[in-house]
Amino acid sequence: MFAKLFAPTLEVSAHCDLPCGVYDPAQARIEAESIKAIIAKVADNDDPDFRTRAIVIKEQRSELVKHHLWVLWTDYFKPPHFEKYPQLHTLFNEATKLAGASGTKGELDAGKADELLAKIDEIAEIFWETKKA
């Protein structure tokens, strides 16, 4: 019994809280693609009820983009990743702002949706490089 209490401990670390493969920037990208499609549909529709519903859904999707990006930023990426890719913090900051009130959540600007998709693609490229390592 005492042997277990005083046995040396082994320090371990893991990429994620759950088994590998749980994290994927595709989740954020799918929501961002939905936002872009909604913006196009709103531009082509004059029905106020439709527009209201679409805007609410667009805002919800923008929150989901932010959520998926934050999970990657705070749970998946670790200090060695940020050392190797020093632009990561800036990419995540810019991407979450593009999904926020001054971006796709608060505006009906297809250009903002394109910018958001481009930032997600940059993050995804780095993500997949880290998965190869």
Image (tube, rainbow, N blue to C red):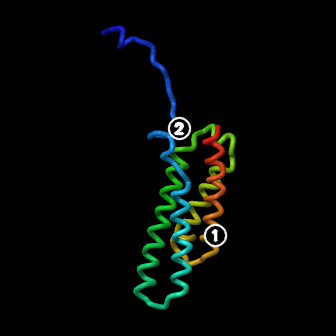
Q: Is 10 located above or below residue 81 in the figure?
A: above
* Of 38 and 111, the residue lying toward us: 38
CB contact under 8 Å: marks 1 and 2: no
Label 2's element?
loop
Circle 2 Cα neighbour tier, 10 Å, few/some/many (<14 / 14–19 / ≥20): few
* Of 94 and 39, the residue lying toward us: 39
Q: Is 4 located above or below residue 21 in the figure?
A: above
Name the residue rendered at 60%, 39% in the picture: 79
Horizontal side of 111 relative to 16 (left or right) equals right
Q: What residue is disc 1 on?
A: 114
Q: Classify the position of the N terminus by image quarter.
A: top left
Q: Classify the position of the C terminus by image quarter.
A: top right
Count numbered badges in the picture: 2
Q: Amino acid at mark 2?
A: His
Name the residue rendered at 61%, 48% in the picture: 127
Circle 1 Cα neighbour tier, 10 Å, few/some/many (<14 / 14–19 / ≥20): some
Q: Position of residue 22 (x, y in %)?
A: 48, 46
Q: Residue furthest left?
A: 1
Name the residue rendered at 55%, 85% in the picture: 43
Name the residue rendered at 45%, 14% in the picture: 8
Gap between marks 1 and 2, in whole Å?
Answer: 30 Å
Q: Position of residue 100 (x, y in %)?
A: 53, 66
Horizontal side of 31 relative to 95 (left or right) equals left
Q: Amino acid at mark 1?
A: Asp
Label 1's element?
helix
Q: Residue furthest bottom?
A: 46
Picture disc at residue 101: none
Q: Position of residue 53 (x, y in %)?
A: 41, 79
Picture disc at residue 15: 2
Q: Earlier in the sequence, mark 1 or mark 2?
A: 2
Q: Is 1 located above or below residue 79 in the figure?
A: above
